[in-house]
Image (cartoon, rainbow, N blue to C red):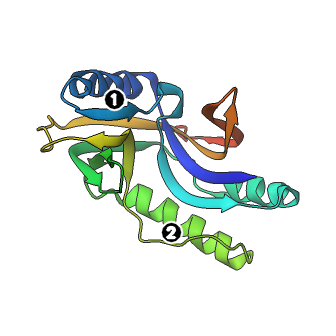
Amino acid sequence: MRIFYALTFDEKTLDTIQAIQDSFEELLEKGRRTASSNLHLTLSFLGEQDPRLLPLFKEITYRLPSNPICLQFTHLGRFDKAGGSILWLGMNHNPDIETIQAMLVKELKASGIRFSDTPFNAHVTLFRNVRLAKLPPLSSFWGNAQALHLMHSHQVHSVLTYTPLASNFLLEK
């Protein structure tokens, strides 16, 4: 099963991100929009994993900090790929996210989990397979992470779907 850890957002933040998608969609020569239900910030992508390890992955989810995280989104970026780029929403350096991500990677490694430990770049994918001459400007805004999830990435009726398998809601203590 294909899994990853991610932060999801509160409704106000999601609304703002969707408004940004709306405003940029007409500027794209080509591109596929990320569905609102799939908007997230990936903390670690684990790829294909043995379903028998799910109890361990869930336990790791619950061991991570659950304090609220405020995010300042400041810029757009893209990862260039053959066939079209990935257009993403970036943010300022955020020690809370970086701490959780580093703790997660440490837990995974200590548990002997194999995964791609690439350098962390906090972002939210807005569009895939994009053709765009230049990145449009972005007015920075603040948002909130709502929960940390262990997610299952799979197809439901040929639609990419992210289903939470375990959730750690970020609450005031």
Say whether residue 62 is left or right of residue 122.
right
Question: Which quarter of the rendered picture does the C terminus lie within?
Answer: top right
- The residue under label 2 is which amino acid type? Ala
Q: Callout 2: 10 Å neighbours few (<14), some, many (20+)?
A: some
Amino acid type of the residue tagged 1 in the rendering: Ile
Residue 149 screen position, x and y as percent: 62, 44
Badge 1: residue crowd in 10 Å (few <14, some 14–19, many ≥20): many
Which residue occupies 33% across, 29% down?
17
Looking at the image, which is closer to me, 144 or 57?
57
Q: Say which of 119 and 65 sits in front.
A: 119
Q: Considering only vertical position in the picture, is 146 above or below 157?
A: below
- Circle 2 SS class: helix
The front one of 112 and 129 is: 129
**Would you say 72 lies left or right of 11 here?**
left
Q: Which mark is residue 102?
A: 2
Residue drawn at (28%, 49%) of the image: 91
Q: Position of residue 75 (x, y in %)?
A: 20, 46
Q: Residue furthest front?
A: 83
Q: Where is residue 51 drawn, in percent x and y?
A: 84, 55
